[in-house]
Amino acid sequence: MTLPVQYSDDQAEAWDAITELLRGAGVDLVEGTTAPAVEKAKPAVLAVMGKAGSGKTLLLAELVKSLRELGLETVSGDWESRKRGEKRTLAILAPTNKAASVLRNRGVPATTIHRIIYTPVYDPEYEKIAEWLAGEGDRPTIEGLTEDALDRAHAFYQQQPSVPGALAAAGLRGSDFITGWKRRDDPLDIGFVDESSMLDDKQMDDLREIFSTLVLFGDPAQLAPVGQSGSMVFDALPDSRKRMLDRVHRQAADSPILDLAHALGDPALQFEDFERMIEQAAARDDRVVVAQRVDAELMSRSPVLVWRNATRIRLISAFRAAHGAPEFALLPGEPLICDGVELPLKHRKKRIDLEARGLIKGAQCVFMGEGRKPGFSRLYVMGAEEPQVNAATIIKIEKPDQEEPFIPSAARMGAAFVHGAACTIHKAQGSQWSDVQVFAPDLYGAARMGRSEAGIPLWKRLAYVAITRAETRLHWVTKYRLARPAEPLGIEDLRNPEPSVLTLEAEAPE
């Protein structure tokens, strides 16, 4: 028997505010009724803010559960029925693949903002399969697909309602059934946005164009997006459209990591005091570790979090040297971080293609090997629903004291990457890993400089974001040292389905 959720007072107030917002949009959680969507000149927006452990995710998950029970259709971004009619829609969004995967691991059907902004265009023949799987058409007969293949697709869809996953189970690749991507031209109803502290003004404008009702869930203690002058999108909302969750909700096994995160809210706390708190936590709980060296094995799947770029580059060089990586090539298993897409403006469709498949700025990837064509790489996109792709890549590996990076993959255009063994704390926002290494000497440097952001010492913001990336264990690294790995790099821990092929062929001049 599942007991009903017991909300704190601040959670209950936030729930009531969201309920009232949804009622205004024709979705009544109290009465259990929905009305047809009404076009609004301006979307209704509400923000629910709170620090780590304040219950934002629990509130989001329970709201999603209630809305789905009410009959709202969850939009995933992989395939959408044309027969929706007046059925109300709900989308749960996150700015990054990793942030979306964190929600999916908790049973919330989240997707990335890009997968909602851009929708796939299906080959009409294979779309018949999608319609059949969704109960909107008869079982099709498809040339080249056996009855057994269709049975496998159906069995997969019953377990997990993902059309691309079902088609992959039938033996198809993404390039077989998705012919391209287009910007969404049909509106949606309700959007829940997690990790909204990461949104910039452009993304917020895009969401306002699509959704008539938006609920933002965010942490005001995180770092503001670069270029936002220390402000977050919910800062511009009136107070009546904000709800703050102040209470920290204790779990069955109290988290020393959350304790440390919330201790940073003490204005009198100095860096040296905080380090002593970490040492005390480590002495009584193995979920906090004070380390003299960076662990090179951990770096292959979860980057060391640093403040300064120079530190990042030195640690990456040390990681590659420790693993015996060749000077002018990448080893399978080396981590990468997408640094954006480098394409001329006329190749807009190709940009959409890459971004819709998860290759967006900040995406955590693993190099699987060279692709079938020169300049192509096989990649595993961490947290993506279809993680393996074969894409045109421009990979840049910076070296200490060298202006020009080493470029092991130099496609003429495509997705750009930097090495991912170490990453700045800014880029780590929205991601979580089981074990996280935080490079303390960098935070000490920020403390010595005395810099502040929005009235809060910068080192505290950096420390808060960095340590809350850890799901299970925090490693507080105190020295400029690297422990050599006991195991070589590899890709055996990654799933190995046939990758989707992303081609970047020259387009005819306009």
Image (cartoon, rainbow, N blue to C red):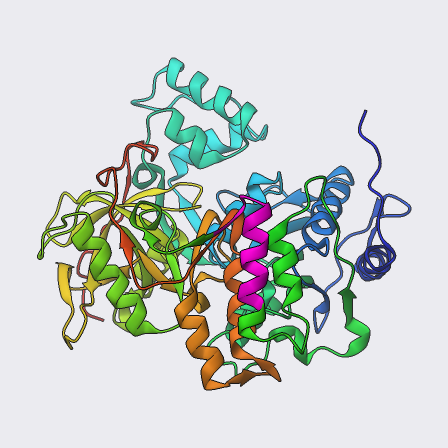
Among the 4 quarters of the image, the one containing residue 423: bottom left
Q: Nearer the viewer, residue 180 or 392?
A: 392
* Residue 178 location (% of width, % of height): 36, 43
Q: What residue sits 40% from the left and 69% below the top?
A: 441
Residue 209 lies in the magenta stretch: no
* Residue 333 location (% of width, % of height): 25, 43
* Magenta stretch, residue numbers: 274-289
Q: What residue sits 24% from the left and 54% below the top?
A: 319
Number of labels in the image equals 0
Q: As drawn, which residue projects farthest toward the top?
A: 148
Q: Is residue 461 left or right of residue 510?
A: right
Instruction: Examine the residues drawn in magenta and state their main secondary structure.
Output: helix
Q: Can I make out residue 93 in this image? A: yes
* Residue 279 location (% of width, % of height): 54, 57
Q: Nearer the viewer, residue 497 or 180?
A: 497
Q: Quadrant of the N terminus?
A: top right
* Residue 352 location (% of width, % of height): 37, 59
Q: What residue sits 73% from the left and 41% below the top?
A: 65
Q: Quadrant of the C terminus?
A: bottom left
Q: Can I make out residue 206 in this image? A: no
> In the figure, 78 relative to 400: above or below?
above
